[in-house]
Amino acid sequence: MPDELTKWERFSRPWAGLTGHAQPGQRRWGVGVGAVLISLLAVRLGVPRAVPPGEVPLPRLGAEAGSIGDAERRLDAASGTPLPSSVRAVGEFVRRVGLAEAKRDPDETRYERGLLQQQVRRVLDAGGADDLLELREVQTALFIQALARWDGSETTPKELRELGGGFVAHLGPGPGVGRIETTELEAAYRTRWTALLELEEHVRFVPTLNDYRAAARLKLRLADRLPPAERLQVQRRIIEQISRLDATYPAQYALGVALYLAGDYSESLLAFREHSRVHPDGEWTLRARNYQLAAASAVLGDVRE
């Protein structure tokens, strides 16, 4: 997909490995047997047990997170007051960009985005930031409603293509999307909409930490559908980005889980060891030690083979 179509994914750009140990082409034999044995001994002294990890932890939403259906309620509240024509024009350009994105036409997308940016500047220069914020909530609610009506057919409805553009391609068929929390879809769409209008740095439009958390939750759920090798790549990028924004997210622990599930036991072991070093006590500590023991045992099993 062209660069123009993926700006909403700015928080999933490639980053360096979190452990600092991974190198291109490195095999999982990067952990020596002696280090593995030391890990096994150290972890056993803490009375853990070898338990394989289940899934990468999702970022936790703060208390200020909007509840499911907030966008729909805001749409109902706004429906009685028509937006100015200049703001409605922004909404129309958003739809035109969406159609160009859905067609994967980079030239048309670039052209339509240029027109969109011009109209956004006109509205902001006229003091219309509040109206644009309302437009974002309206189009978020309309997108969620259109997604809910999608019957899962291969042909994506026009309204979804208009409102979601390239974003819809990440979601897959309608029935699978129905199992995703609405709060996460709303946050991901708001983040995408804000990036489309190039308003991420505008004080009135910058996404909240909860928006980033919820969007990351959605992206991690969607990553589970990918083949193992691609899944690890995507998970690593998301983990790195959300850890830069949310200091409470256990990045090394999450990376260890992702690596273990991808079969890279030696790098997984290093990640769990790093988490235990930085967090000798805490919510994730015991599980990290259990997983560290499982990773060390898996490495030894590979070596014996």
Image: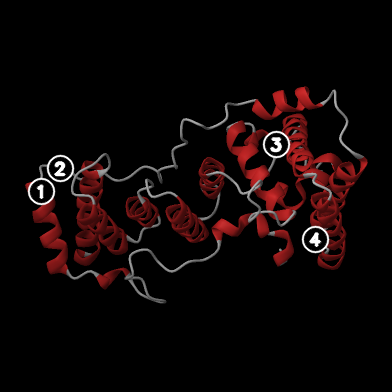
CA gap, disc 3 to disc 1? 47 Å
CA gap, disc 2 to disc 3? 42 Å
Q: Amino acid at mark 3?
A: Gly
Q: Secondary structure at mark 1?
A: helix
State if disc 3 and disc 2 touch (CB < 8 Å). no
- Comparing 271 with 4, the one in front is 4
- Comparing 304 with 63, the one in front is 63
Q: Secondary structure at mark 4?
A: loop
Q: How many numbered discs?
A: 4
The correct choice, above or below, for 78 with respect to 253 in the image is above
| Residue 179 makes an appearance in the image | no
Whether residue 151 sits left or right of residue 250 in the image: it is: right
- Residue depicted at 25% across the width and 59% down the height: 274
> Residue 200 appears at what percent x and percent y?
64, 54
Residue at mark 4: 104
> Residue 71 appears at what percent x and percent y?
69, 30
Task: Say whether disc 3 or disc 1 marks the residue closer to the N-terminus.
Answer: 1
Q: Amino acid at mark 4?
A: Arg
Q: Amino acid at mark 2?
A: Pro
CA gap, disc 1 to disc 2? 6 Å
Q: Quadrant of the N terminus?
A: bottom right
CA gap, disc 1 to disc 4? 54 Å
Residue at mark 1: 44
